[in-house]
Amino acid sequence: MEAVELMEMNPAIWLTLFFAPIIASFPIAIAWVTRQDEFARRLSVISIFGLFVSFVITVYILFGVEEGRYVYPWLPSLGINFAFMVDYLSKYMGALTGIIAFLIGVYGYEYMKEDYRLGWYWFFFNLFTASMLLVVYSDNLLMLLIGWEGLGIASWGLIGHWFRDDDELSYVGVIGRKVGPLDMFWSPSTGGWRAISTIRIGDIPMFFAVAAIFTLTGSLDISQINWEHLFEMIGPWGTIILLIAFLMGPFTKSAQLPFSEWLMTAMTGPTTVSALLHSATMVAAGTYVFMRLSWYVEPWKLHGAGVETVYLIVLFVGLISSLYGASVALASRERKVLLAASTMSSLGLMFASAAASKWVGEFAIVVAFWYLMTHAFAKATLFLVAGHLIHVTHDRFLCGDIEVMKKLKTSAAVTLFATIALAGIPPLTAYWVKAAMDEVLHELIHDVGVLPLALLIIISVVYSAFLAKFFVLNFVKGKKVHLHLHGGGVMTLAYTFMVSMLVILLVVISGAFDEHAHEFVHAGLVATSAGVGLLVLAAYVIGYVKPEYNSPIGQVLYDRVYVMALNDFIVPKIGWAIAWVCDAFNRFVDYVTHKAIPDLIEAYSNGIRAIQSGSLERYVKIVVGLILVVLLIASVMGW
Amino acid sequence: MELVIPALLILAVSGALSFKWKYFGLAGALVAAIMTSVNHPVILMIFIVALLNLVSFDLMRGFLRGIDYTLVGLIFVATVYAFYTQSLAMLLTMFVAASVPTYMLVMTADKDIRMDVGIKYITFMVIATILFIMGAVILISSVNTPLYYIGYAMLLIGLAIEVGVAPFHEWVPDVFDAADPIPISVVASIAKFVPFIVAYKILTTVQIDYNLLVFTGIISSISMFIGNIGGLTSTKPARILAYSTVANMGYILATLSVIARPEFIYIAFAGALLQLITNAFGKVGFFVGIKDGGASPISSYLIALSFIGLPPLMGFWGKFYILMSLVYANIIWLAAILVINSAMSVPYYIRLAKLVGIGSQRSLAATIVGICALIMFLTVVPPDWVIESSKILTNYLTIGGV
């Protein structure tokens, strides 16, 4: 492992990066407690400015700061310090977070104009941004966990933003519909709870894993830990347990199976939240942490059976989750649920590609990372468009005929471009990245088999189809619907900028501005990649022509293969079982201390007092009898 | 010590004269008591107990008025003499001298004479006296023979019956309940000192065996448990006080097992004396309260809290010194049992305080109870004087000659 250089930088830059958004949200957060008038609403501009400041700093770090570690003292006696890492992954990811957060913040100015809880919204929105930046730039696992927790709490606060559960538009699912014992509709407050509880279940093993790493290696800095030595020390089973425990955090945060349900019902939050958290950044944090870990663990250099098993597990969890997500998205009828399921699918692909690094090398991580970036911009754009459509049509289900395209020309154009770019149709951005991904999984055939590549191709095809469905059923062939067209200028501006980032990425790839990304061009020019590209294009066209098809399998997929039974039925039953055991124990303790022991003592007491019958004859008999017994014992002892 | 004989003479004369006017008896008793008092903290405490007993007789009428002062004076003189004498014969005489006056006292009442109580009490006391004296003599003269164990057993049982240690306690609840509270306050307070002092002297002079230590511990544990558990469901104040006596005598008996470690005897003795003193004041307070039909709530709760062992009241320090001596002598199991029993005693003492603390009628009774309650505060400053006292008194513990 090449040594990472230790660098010096004024800590004020880091402090501003993290604290500017948080402090900038204080004016509106505090003011909103007492007044919710026009003046208070305008204070959100300060919050957006805070996001802008962070964005500027991330761009500065991208272009003006040298790669390396920046360390500041924290708990020197334990060897735990504030350690920031500026490397290939964090530079780009930081700038990505910065610009997406800022653009969505601007979008949110118009989108959330009429909201009743702006103080809460902006505080958690900015807290989220600061936490995400902390996760991105952290080299120290403890710092990363602080950011990680910030992401969780912000997610809960923002998903459950419309906590009064009084607006049908904020629900997920058809209200009142049931399948068996399961309610197939979820409110914002339920959504918030599902998010935080699922993430928490993943966080617990992750915390233990971090503690174990510190105990075993004495360090928490990802780039400094001697991973090879650690894995040798704990053996293959130890490696598997440690890494899987650690990865439970990323798995739950990135909504892989079987932890995917929270992401689907996270759509009860405002669309800005869905765009920022649940497409581009927070859910990507899980995959990002896995990529960051793999970047420094360098599994391609390690030969233990434990590491291989772990990466195989991640590979297949990613691919299967991706296939599941794509299928559910294909069958979805709600705008945001479709996009959420597609996000889950993309995250699976990111995990799979990064896991392939075990056999392929660092390039696989780069591919996964570029896919993350492409997906982030594209999906954020689509979410922002979906939000605009929900505003305009007052409906969260896929609807809108050609009238919508005529009235919202820019939105339609942006959506078309984003879907084609993301599907992997040549010659747009995702084609080159997906081609590189094909190449990576192609190299796995020797070690793992042809299954990963086959799954990737199937997933790409399905992905393309539902993206077409999204475009067509919103702008061309959907149900006719009444339009509320007013304003929307700021929102349109925001997502136009967002989609233009895809063009910038394309330029970077093709123009050889980045030494890694230039490889994608080579991959894209290979014949097999072109073949896959054509397959994807065909799928898009088919989806365009026939976006809807009723079938029993489709209905099962629409109900997300009943995975919600885990969240809504099985886990609650386990909880009730635990509660029952606790209650039984409580009642037992209560019985012993308040009934059994007092009754016992009372019986003894009454027995003692019963000796006093009043009869002197009886007393003398007792005493003389005892005297004789004692004297007998005494004489025996004396002998 | 030289004044003991004159004191006894004065007691005898004033006792006879008391038939004319009862306060002659009081005067004689006072004079005799002052004559025999020694300038020593523990003795002074016992003197105050005796004083309270004497004064409390004014709350009752009955056939023994006048001579009851003499009887209490006799018990006091016997107690003081028992501390200082080092002759076995004198010790055994003092044992009897402290015991017999109580035989008459329990039978006295405001209107009639309580024969049944007297018969019950005297039967047990006689058995006790016989066993104690025989055991003492056998023990002293038969070291290292099998008779030694029998002697020890007889001594211990005699002591047990005399003061009311379970499982030989059957007379205590009945007698405490049926007799008049005032004489019982004498029986329960000042009459308990001598048996223990004599037992201490005899046992410290003789070589004590480890098995006997365990045997003493077992008896005292039985007494503690029976006293405390029995008191938990008792409803009449006099019966609660009876079981309280059984338990307290158990605590004090536990200190006898420390005699196996001679270097800690002074702490054990200090604990025993302080516990006896607390017990004495407490019982006087409560029984006078019962006689009066009630006492001030503050006084009765204070005395109850002292019995429970709440620091810094006197009752805490007695138990504390006993525990200290047990721990130093490494008899941890007995210390643990003592602590558990202390905790068990809380409910019935509070119940007792509630039953008795309903307000007094006669000012004399209220004063006596008030003094008893106030004395409990004497140990707000930790009572090193008891330890120092005890160290001096342990010099007199060994018996020399007959």
Image (cartoon, coloured by chain):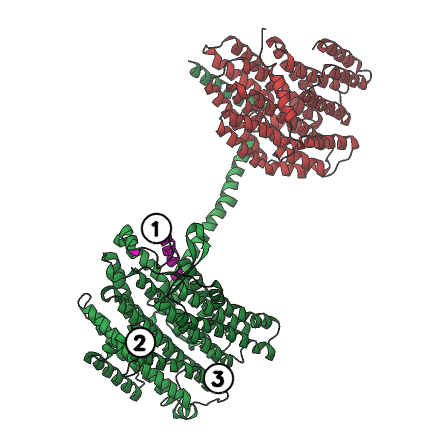
Q: Position of residue A239 (x, y in %)?
A: 29, 55
Report helix, strand or loop for mark 2.
helix
Q: Decide if residue B197 is in sight here.
A: yes
| Chain ID, red in image | B
Q: Which mark is on residue A490? A: 3
Q: Nearer the viewer, residue B202 or A85?
A: A85
Q: CA distance from mark 2 to mark 1?
A: 40 Å
For the view shown, which residue lies furthest in the top direction? B401
**In the rendered image, residues at marks 2 and 1 fall on the same chain:** yes
Looking at the image, residue A612 lies above or below residue A5: above
**Based on the displayed image, in which of its 4 quarters is residue A57 positioned?**
bottom left
Q: Nearer the viewer, mark 2 or mark 1?
A: 1
Residue annotated with mark 2: A326
Rendered hue of chain A is: green
Report helix, strand or loop for mark 1.
helix
Compare marks 3 and 1 and give the one earlier in the sequence. Answer: 1
